[in-house]
Amino acid sequence: MNADAAGIIAEGFLKGAFDVFEAMLPVECSHTVVGPVEGSDNLLEELSIAYPVSLGGRIKNQLGSVALLFSLDAATQLVAMIQESGEGAKSDLDDADRALLKEVADPALGGGVTNLMERFGRSVEQLEAVSVEDASPAGLSALLGPSPSAVQFSFRVGALNSDSVLLFSNSIESLVPGSMVGTGKEDSMTLDGLDPLGTEAALSPEEMSDILSGFGPPSTPGPAAPRIPRPENLDMVLDIQLTATARLGRVEMPVGDILNLGPGSIIELGHLVDEPIELLINDKLIARGDVVVVDEKFGLRITEVVSAQGRIESLR
């Protein structure tokens, strides 16, 4: 295990994961990377005893797997925070507890992978087969492959202060750019330094005037679609507040199914994980993009802007 690469992977992954934890839980979250765990013939067995709860998943395209190991005390306190029950640690996790942890683990691990790939300058990859399991040497080996890398870290989630371990497949080390290895520091291309909208996605003043003019009476159609004139006093309307919505998906449901919804219910939106998210302005489609984490909050990176004429037509 390359110590520099392991530290870069741990910091990048944990930053994204704990950003999601903080977004989902009603408390402040933070973490500190301690350092790589020295390997031994019985490392997975020792870790499974100290941290018996595993939140793991595989990165698509066979790029590797990741797992967060927690102590039972920390895992049960996390469950209490998710439930907002005020209860303390329990002696064990039941099926309902594991289901709650999986609801948080899925986006948190995904946020970690997203942030990691962004730092490496790679396209975002999705996680699959995310699960909450009892940690065991056999199970961890099946998920992570032989001799996975291990990095210890400490974390704080609200009043909970604990330590934990990040495990990842050795293949993930090969994804670290060569310019980042050997410095022990993060690469300058971090997610915080990226423009979440992208330079090519910004709307020009002419396009904005076209969009705003769509709120007025439609122009008289002719043989060739005429250009909609730019408003003379554009500055007067630039402070108008519009509602921007990122739509993950939509589904129609019978009233009976809606009445049966409750905590733990899952609604399939019919939206594939690798499909772009739609950006709506006042319920009108304007652009599409990918979900990212920006300054510890979810964001949308615009990858496609609907054509100017298309936006104008949708706003009428």
Image: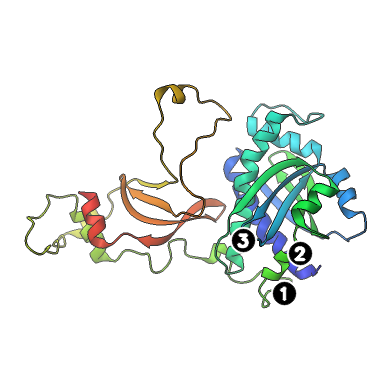
Question: Is label 2 in a helix, a strand or a loop?
Answer: helix
Front position among marks 1 and 2:
2
Residue drawn at x 35%, y 49% is 280
Q: Position of residue 248 (x, y in %)?
A: 45, 46
Point out the frontmost of discs 1 and 3.
Answer: 3
Q: Are marks 1 and 3 in contact (CB under 8 Å)?
A: no
Residue under pointer 1: 181
Is residue 167 in view from this perspective? no
User: Which residue type does callout 2 highlight?
Assistant: Asn
Query: Which residue has dot 3 on it?
Result: 61
Q: Is residue 210 left or right of residue 258?
A: left
Q: Residue at x 72, y 60 (%)?
A: 10
Q: Is residue 132 visible?
A: yes
Residue 309: x %, y % from top left:
22, 60
Q: Of the residues shown, which amino acid type is indicated by label 3?
A: Asn
- Element carrying mark 3: loop
Q: Residue at x 65, y 47 (%)?
A: 129
In this picture, residue 15 sits left or right of residue 311: right
Residue for point 39% across, 56% down: 288
On the image, which quarter does residue 312 sit in? bottom left
Residue 157 shown left or right of residue 275 in the figure = right
Label whose residue precedes the other's in the sequence (1 or 3): 3
Neighbours of disc 2 within 10 Å: few (<14), some (14-19), many (20+)? many
Residue 108 % position (x, y): 63, 48
Q: Earlier in the sequence, mark 1 or mark 2?
A: 2
